Amino acid sequence: MLEALFGNTVVEKILFYLLVYRDGYARGISKTFNISVNGILQQLKRLEDGSIIVGQSKGKTRLYQFNPVYPFLNTLKQLLQNAMDTLPQEEIKKHYRLRTRPRRKGKPF
C-alpha cells in the first residue's frame, strides 16, 4: 500500500509494527512477518540513519521506537494510521494483535 512511498514493503511493515506496539526488536518483528532478520535489520538501520526511529540497547537486544523529536512524527503516525484503517481485518488480526502472549490464568481483567 505505502511501499511506493517508503521504498519497500519491509519498511511499511516495520512502521506499522512500531505504530501498534510502540517498540520492538529485530527478531520479534522478523517473526511477526516471517521475514529474514537481516532484511529487517537493514531497514531498521536505514530508518535509524534517517532519524525516523531510534534504537536503544538493553542487554544484548536493541529495542527500536519512533524518534520523539522527529519533526514529522505526528504526520507520519497519522498517515500510517489512515493506511492501517484500510488494511483487511484478517491481516490486522494476524499481525497487529495488541496482546501477543496469553493472560495469566486467574488474573482479573
Image (spheres, rainbow, N blue to C red):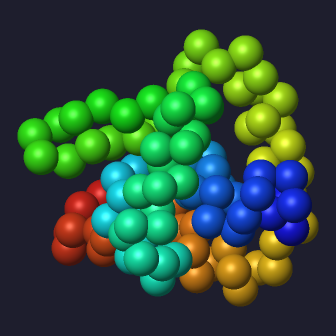
Q: Position of residue 96 (x, y in %)?
A: 58, 67
Left or right? Give the position of 34 relative to 27: right
Q: Position of residue 67 (x, y in %)?
A: 54, 25
Task: Find residue 62 and report its image quarter.
Answer: top left
Q: Nearer the viewer, residue 88 or 6?
A: 6
Q: Position of residue 55 (x, y in %)?
A: 37, 34
Total count of labels? 0
Q: Is residue 105 above or below residue 64?
A: below
Q: Is residue 66 visible?
A: no
Residue at horizontal 46%, vertical 44%? Answer: 45
Q: Position of residue 61 (x, y in %)?
A: 20, 47
- Work out which quarter of the rendered image holds the C terminus and state it: bottom left
Q: Is residue 41 above or below residue 87?
A: above
Left or right? Give the position of 62 relative to 92: left
Left or right? Give the position of 55 relative to 106: right
Residue at horizontal 73%, vertical 15%? Answer: 71
Q: Is residue 3 above or below residue 79?
A: below
Q: Is residue 12 visible?
A: yes
Residue at horizontal 76%, vertical 57%? Answer: 7
- Work out which quarter of the rendered image holds the N terminus and state it: bottom right
Residue at horizontal 80%, vertical 63%? Answer: 3
